[in-house]
């Protein structure tokens, strides 16, 4: 059910000339979930004709009350980051793309060049190939979920990325023990990608985009 108090508040500030982008960004800062905000913004009653357009660069107005909470809307800026496809933070976009890259890499190397990593034969070879295909699919799904800002992106993307982190740590230890500096550096570089993705998924600056 759409929050009536929120709708009334949005109607008032829309009449003052604020855009949906400004309103969404502002309400996200005060803890409102994106789904609730979008439902209120899409409600027909919150889209009246706007008689006056105010300066959108920096505008102040008095405190408002929604569900008993005082909200002070000071210096709403049109350039604020918002939860939209075209204004995603660069780290979220990179995380989605990295998931696709990792998915392709694991699919190719796990299916065709597995012998460069492990000396496998028989059923172990087919198990490794099957596991690689499953993990690569999870990475593709993770990339899609992150770029589409799906609410369960954290759960879906955590699975393959934590597996890859664990795999890289094991391989770094293995290469260190074997004094293979090139191999150790190679897995260190790969490790950067899942660590960045996990950081984006769990950092408070970005988690609000997946709510």
Image: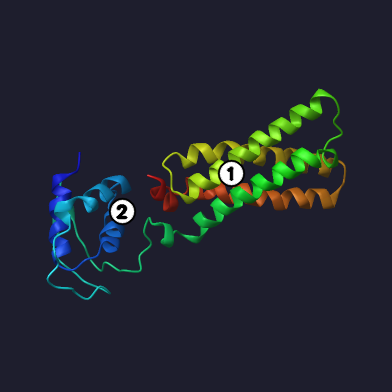
Q: Which residue lies furthest to the top in this view?
A: 123
What crowding class fits label 2: few (fewer than 14 Cα within 10 Å), some (14-19), or many (20 or more)? some
Q: On the rendered image, what quadrant is the C terminus found in?
A: top left
Q: Name the residue under label 2.
A: 28
Residue 40, image x, y percentages: 22, 49
Residue 128, image x, y percentages: 75, 31
Q: Nearer the viewer, residue 24 or 196?
A: 24
Q: Is residue 73 visible?
A: yes
200 w.r.t. 111: above or below: below
Q: Name the residue under label 1.
A: 140
Q: Which mark is residue 76?
A: none
Q: How far apart are marks 1 and 2 (CA)?
A: 28 Å
Which numbered disc flags the more N-terminal residue, 1 or 2?
2
- Secondary element at tag 1: helix
Residue 80, image x, y percentages: 35, 65
Residue depicted at 84% across the width and 40% down the height? 177
Q: Nearer the viewer, residue 59 or 19?
A: 19
Left or right: 136 in relation to 113: left
Residue depicted at 45% across the width and 49% down the height? 148
Left or right: 198 in relation to 68: right
Residue depicted at 83% across the width and 36% down the height? 118
Residue depicted at 85% across the width and 42% down the height? 116
Q: Can residue 69 be seen in this view?
A: no
- Secondary element at tag 2: helix
Residue 175, image x, y percentages: 82, 43
Q: Kindly indicate whether the residue at mark 2 contacts the one at mark 1 (C-beta within 8 angstroms).
A: no
């Amino acid at each position: 059910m759409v929050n009536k108090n929120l709708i009334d508040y949005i109607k008032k500030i829309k009449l003052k000339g604020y855009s949906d982008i400004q309103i969404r960004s502002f309400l996200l800062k005060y803890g409102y979930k994106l789904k609730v905000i979008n439902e209120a913004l899409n409600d027909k009653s919150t889209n009246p004709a706007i008689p006056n357009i105010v300066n959108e660069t920096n505008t102040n107005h008095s405190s408002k009350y929604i569900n008993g909470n005082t909200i002070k809307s000071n210096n709403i800026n049109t350039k604020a980051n918002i939860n939209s496809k075209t204004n995603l933070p660069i780290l979220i976009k990179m995380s989605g793309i990295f998931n696709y890259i990792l998915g392709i890499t694991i699919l190719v190397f796990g299916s065709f060049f597995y012998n460069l990593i492990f000396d496998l034969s028989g059923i172990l070879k087919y198990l490794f190939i099957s596991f690689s295909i499953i993990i690569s699919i999870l990475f593709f799904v993770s990339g899609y979920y992150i770029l589409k800002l799906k609410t369960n992106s954290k759960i879906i993307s955590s699975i393959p990325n934590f597996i890859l982190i664990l795999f890289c740590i094991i391989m770094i230890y293995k290469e260190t023990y074997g004094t293979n500096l090139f191999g150790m550096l190679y897995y260190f570089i790969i490790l950067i990608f899942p660590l960045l993705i996990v950081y984006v998924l769990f950092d408070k600056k970005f988690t609000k985009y997946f709510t």
